[in-house]
Image: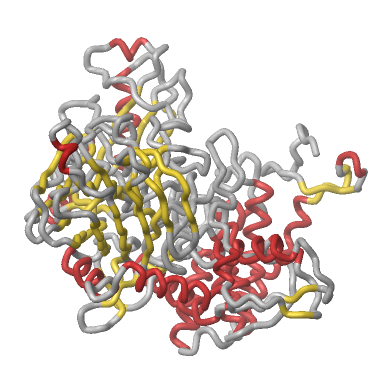
Amino acid sequence: EMVSTSFCGFLPAFALLLGSAQVLGTKDPVDHVDILLGTKSRIDFSVGNILPFIGRPWGMNQWTPQTNNYKPNAAGSKSWWFHPEDMELYGIRCTHQPSPWINDYGNFLIVPEMGWMRSQYPNKCNTFRDTFYSPYRMDTVVDTHCDGKGNCLTLNLTGTERGAIIKLTFPPYNPSMQTTGWDQTRRVRLLLGSNLTDAINAVASPASITGFTQANSGGVPHNLKTDVRQQQQQGGDTCMETSQTVKNVGYSGNDLYRFQVNITDDMEAAANECKAQCCADDGCRAWTLDFPKSSMMASSSSAPPLSDRFNCSDAFPCCWIKTLAMYNGGSSSHFSGYKKGFGPESVETKFHHYFHLETEPPIAMKAGIKQNVSDNMYDQGLEAFLEFDPATVSEITIRVATSFISPEQAKLNLDRELPKTKSFEDVAKESRQRWNEVLSAIEVEKPSRNEDPKDKERLDLFYSSMYRASIFPRSLAEIAENGSLVHYSPYDSMGRTFPGEIMTDSGFWDAYRTLYQLTALVHPDQYHKSIRGWLNAYKEQGWLPGWPSPGERGAMASTMQDCVIADAILRGDVLQDEDDVQLAYEAIRKNAFTVTPIGSKKGRAGLGDYIKYGYLPEDGDNQNQVAGTLNFMLADYSIAMAAQKLGKKEDAAALFKRAANWRLLFDQTATGGSFGVPGFLKAKFKNGSFVTDFDV
């Protein structure tokens, strides 16, 4: 539906476009999108922390060049892997990264190559130039692979909801150069991050690369095998009864959390404290202890090697509460392994991102697997490659699609979205048309009829912002063979498949008052779809997610998803079924009234104190005393409005009363800094006194 409107408050660009006099004729708004806007970011200097995504609006996958393969920065983070000023190209990355602070999952790298096999960093990088970026395609010249006559390898990329097509055009084959030792072999490589948890297979005829990756940064379901669960329930061996205390176990990005152990002189006591926390946490499958360089314990022969000190002081041991991964079957050439730590020995990670890659021409000269690949970013990577005869192959078309459900579903997604009857240009044209449809939901009006040289700049900013608002939250739903909508659930402890929509990659703490309001206004169908997806997440997890990627990450303060769901109830036209209305209210009411254990990623941290004192006290369990309290109150007010609409008078009265408690944190004696405004919100202790070391 076309919406012609002028407003401000949702995106920065809107403030520049107030007024209504003349519609700016924008037939193809996608041409105004600059996907590099906001990408000029490093860990030490950020102008947006976003990536140049190529794909489809709200697609399950996005694709982007990886231009940085340096060693991990930011205390082990590997999430700053693109910068528009980089000259290196490591490949095209399948990514789901919503933020470098949240990091990626299900990611893998597709690398074009010509010549000899480049095995180690930095030789594996290519250089590239003359790149065209847009939401629907990327075109670039890979000038590492040129023939000296101005002919270079070119790469063209476009995406679908669950796949991508990459066209590689190589320099003309020169048979006379073969005798000089110039290798002109054409090659396609696919790189995974872990030799221990991922699986891959390469076949020359028909040419294909298949497998899965378990790459994640948290937010994925893990579960014990049934026999191990029963053994624990029957009082068998528990993790506290293991014979060996201190043991270092590896990990593959599946750590739940870390905490500092305030013991420096007793290795066994420090290890037991870490072990006890693991035993008390249902999510823990293994633990390990890292020791500071300054500690006497670090010199012990039984102590684990030094490792990342993220989130722990250099003066104290660091306890890592972990999950482990194991692949339990399949037919790939490389099986993922597993690592044993304390706790049950058989652990499954119920998270797999399956991929299916095919090429045209369909016959490769050679197919192979490389294990334990050292690629600087990955210490133990896993790689498959296809090689093609340069005498007969001048162009390779790569078609790849993925699934979170099964390898068969990945193949089905490939056949459905990228059939061989569609050329690269056909798919790119479809993608361009889809972006134009989404971006054209708003007609931009200029304030006057006078020509303004800044009109194009304003349109570029506006539609670039609209593009960003049309990526997250992403849908993880897939279309089954029978045509029904189904999804893998990162919220279910068994990682099962369920019917219907599911959403992920959304930080409600930021988006509840911006993105969701905008989407409800200009893309109501997508808004309705996202609400259904969040309610399915509630049914599968028992809680509404607050920062899922792909499952709950437990980041940010409060439960601002309550505002989004309450808003959907209040709109009246979003949830048509009365059962859905009641389910939606049940979900937000649970956040408001159900106290969760300390350290839980579900519900509101500190809710018990909030209910008892009317605010989050400075000497309580929540670290966001004032901001957290205000967020709780805003969520309470939103739920109260929904309760009032549904006739739930007692809930409404209780929540309206709680929402008015902001007065408890308002110190009338404080002054607002240089402005001299009387009164300011300040943190309080449990005894009701304000903090004294307060500086506006």
- Please tell me which residue lies in front, 355 or 695: 355
Using the rendered image of the protein, determine whether residue 237 is visible from the camera's viewpoint: no
Q: Position of residue 580 (x, y in %)?
A: 45, 83
Using the rendered image of the protein, determine whether residue 299 is visible from the camera's viewpoint: yes
Q: Position of residue 442 (x, y in %)?
A: 64, 77
The C terminus lies in quadrant: top right
Residue projecting furthest to the front: 176
- Residue drawn at the location 22% of the way across and 26% of the way down: 247
- Please tell me which residue lies in front, 288 or 339: 339
Numbered label tally: 0
Q: Position of residue 58 (x, y in %)?
A: 45, 68
- Residue drawn at the location 24% of the way across and 57% of the way down: 395
Asked if residue 689 is positioned above or below residue 267 in the image, the reply reads below
Colour style of the rendered protein structure: secondary structure
Asked if residue 73 is positioned above or below residue 603 in the image, the reply reads above
* Left or right of 513 on screen, residue 112: left
- Please tell me which residue lies in front, 617 or 335: 335
Q: Kindly indicate the quadrant of the structure image that contains residue 70.
A: top left
* Left or right of 502 on screen, residue 421: left
* Left or right of 655 on screen, residue 362: left
- Residue drawn at the location 46% of the way across and 55% of the way down: 596
Q: Position of residue 638 (x, y in %)?
A: 64, 71
- Residue drawn at the location 46% of the way across and 20% of the way down: 314
- Please tell me which residue lies in front, 253 or 525: 525
* Left or right of 152 on screen, residue 212: left
The N terminus lies in quadrant: bottom right
Q: Kindly indicate the quadrant of the structure image that contains residue 344.
A: top left
Asked if residue 277 is positioned above or below residue 112 in the image, the reply reads above
Q: Kindly indicate the quadrant of the structure image that contains residue 318.
A: top left
